[in-house]
């Protein structure tokens, strides 16, 4: 997630500096939608849209139609705007646009929303777009980038967020910026005291427990606090719809992989650990503590244990009755 690149694109659109082609691709859809919506709201006014805006969908159109529409001249407007949504449905035929992309109409702004997929950089079509237009590869951000993004997003509207509240959102919602943004908008509407979002506000309005969440479980395990970890594990087992076992196991697996990587680093400075592991600098000291409890040899065994329990949680080789305490059994094995 290159915020500097995205901010530059946004700034140019706001200043009415346009490219004839916008190819918006990648796994993270928040910025694809943001740039598409920005173009849709900025290029044409309401009167101009009647004659000069065309929205096509990948599954309902074809390459010939797209090219035909793009070659039209605008009516009573400087530009026409052509938006292709769900263009990933045209992935097997997308190369058919090459000739147009090599010689685009400068009075046409073509926006291609190519979600969840990317173009091969070696292809002629990629080089053609790069020469005459703009390509955005919107990648899924790392956990530490999401944390910073949440703080920055709230700061834009003069809101702040407690560190723990921030991590609760990251742990619960992952790296889905669109979902996180929706929840932030919801929290801002509640007008929190002093415009600060704290764990209690999140617990009451999003349903994430401030005391029983994956962030707290990982912290308890990392610090060797067995009783606390078991209490949280018990809570998860009784609230399996909110905290599915596989989700918890996935988080624990990633945590110990990161801890294994930490051991292998020669440079264990806060900056380097944060960069390599993709974590917030605030957590680096916790990894130093956890590394003393969990040496590499033990971590290798723990990773194998988690994989085995993951299979059991999916019903392989165990009865339903024996799955009730599967998480706490794992916590005991990890920490003893």
Image: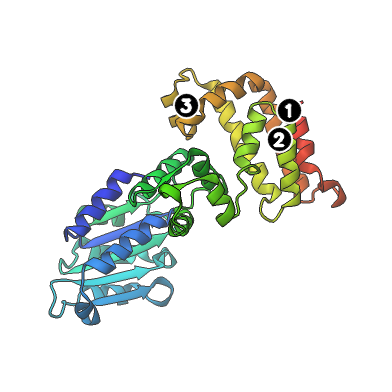
Which residue is identified by label 2? 229
Q: Residue at x 33, y 75 (%)?
A: 55
Residue 36, how many percent across, how many down?
32, 63
User: What number is the disc on residue 69?
Assistant: none
Viewer-proximal residue among 328 and 314: 328
Q: Residue at x 73, y 41 (%)?
A: 233
Q: Are marks 2 and 1 in contact (CB under 8 Å)?
A: yes
Where is 123 relative to 60, above or below?
A: above
How much space separates mark 3 and mark 1, taking CA atoms? 24 Å
Where is 317 relative to 16, above or below?
A: above
Q: Secondary structure at mark 2?
A: helix
Residue 17, how many percent across, how many down?
16, 58
Which residue is identified by label 3? 273
How much space separates mark 2 and mark 1, taking CA atoms? 9 Å
Query: Which image quarter is the C terminus in?
Result: top right
Q: Secondary structure at mark 1?
A: helix
Tell which residue pokes out farthest to the front in this image.
Answer: 193
Q: Nearer the viewer, mark 3 or mark 1?
A: 1
Where is 102 relative to 282, above or below?
A: below
Which residue is identified by label 1? 335
């Amino acid at each position: 997630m290159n915020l500097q690149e995205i901010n530059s694109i946004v700034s140019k659109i706001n200043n009415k500096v346009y490219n004839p082609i916008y190819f918006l691709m990648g796994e993270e859809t928040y910025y694809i939608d943001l740039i598409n919506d920005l173009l849709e709201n900025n290029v044409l006014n309401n009167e101009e849209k009647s004659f000069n805006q065309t929205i096509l969908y990948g599954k309902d159109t074809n390459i010939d139609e797209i090219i035909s529409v793009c070659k039209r001249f605008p009516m009573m407007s400087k530009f026409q705007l052509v938006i292709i949504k769900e263009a990933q449905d045209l992935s097997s035929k997308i190369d058919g646009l090459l000739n147009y992309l090599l010689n685009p109409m400068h009075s046409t702004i073509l926006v291609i929303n190519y979600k969840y997929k990317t173009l091969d950089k070696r292809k002629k079509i990629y080089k053609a777009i790069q020469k005459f237009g703009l390509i955005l590869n919107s990648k899924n951000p790392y956990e530490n980038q999401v944390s910073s993004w949440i703080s920055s997003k709230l700061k834009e509207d003069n809101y702040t967020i407690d560190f723990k509240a921030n991590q609760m959102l990251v742990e619960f919602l992952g790296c889905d910026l669109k979902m996180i943004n929706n929840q932030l908008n919801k929290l801002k509407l509640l007008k929190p005291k002093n415009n600060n979002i704290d764990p209690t506000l999140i617990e009451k309005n999003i349903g994430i427990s401030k005391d029983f969440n994956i962030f707290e479980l990982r912290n308890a395990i990392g610090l060797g606090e067995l009783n606390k970890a078991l209490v949280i594990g018990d809570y998860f087992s009784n609230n399996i719809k909110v905290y599915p076992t596989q989700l918890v196991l996935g988080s624990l697996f990633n945590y110990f992989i990161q801890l294994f990587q930490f051991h292998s680093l020669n440079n264990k400075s806060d900056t380097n650990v944060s960069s390599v592991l993709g974590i917030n600098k605030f957590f680096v000291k916790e990894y130093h503590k956890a590394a003393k409890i969990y040496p590499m040899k033990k971590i290798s065994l723990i990773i194998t244990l988690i994989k085995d329990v993951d299979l059991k949680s999916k019903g392989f080789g165990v009865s339903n009755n024996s799955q009730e305490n599967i998480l706490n059994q794992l916590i005991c094995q990890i920490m003893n």
